[in-house]
Amino acid sequence: MSQIVPLDLLNAGDCGEVVEVTGEISLVTHLAEKGVRPGGRIEAIQPGDPFILMIDGTRLTMRTDGRAEILVKIQS
C-alpha cells in the first residue's frame, strides 16, 4: 500500500513520486521548472531546512518554509 505524505516528512533515503504541488502560483511554476511536479521521481537526500533531494536525477536544495506544499507517494 502506498502512503502519501508531505515532502518535509520524508526521511533520508525515502523515494517516491510527486503527486501534488500547491501554493503561490509563481512558486509552483518555479518548482515545476526545476522538475518538482506531479509524476516526478524524488529521493530524500538530507531532510531538514534546507531540504536536499534528488528529482529525476538532479540534486536540488530547497527551503521548507511552508510557501508550497509538496505531496509525495512513498514507494513501499
Image (cartoon, rainbow, N blue to C red):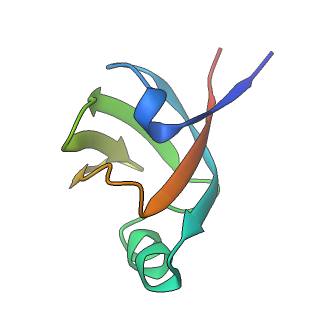
User: Percent position (x, y) of residue 40?
Assistant: 54, 53
Which of the pair 51/37 is nearer the observer?
A: 51
Picture coordinates of residue 28 (x, y %)? 49, 74
Q: Quadrant of residue 52?
A: top left
Above or below: residue 3 compared with residue 69: above
Q: Image check: 50 left or right of 64? A: left
Q: Nearer the viewer, residue 66 or 45?
A: 66
Q: Give the residue displayed 62% in from the left and 22% down from the top.
A: 75
Is 70 located above or below residue 73 in the figure? below
Give the side of residue 28 with respect to residue 63, left or right: right
**In the displayed structure, would residue 22 be above or below residue 9?**
below
The structure residue drawn at horizontal position 50% and vertical position 77%, both measured from the top left corner, is 24
x, y percent for residue 6: 55, 38
How many marks the image carries: the answer is 0
Q: Quadrant of residue 65?
A: bottom left
Q: Quadrant of the C terminus?
A: top right
Residue farthest to the right, as pictured: 1
Looking at the image, residue 76 lies above or below residue 21 = above
Work out which residue is located at the far bottom of the displayed protein and give it. 26
Q: Is residue 68 left or right of residue 12?
A: right
Residue 60 location in percent, x, y?
A: 24, 52
Which residue lies at the image location 42% right of the left edge and 50% below the top edge? 56
Quadrant assignment for the N terminus: top right
Foreground: 44 or 41? Answer: 44
**Quarter of the figure with residue 10:** top left
x 58%, y 61%: residue: 21
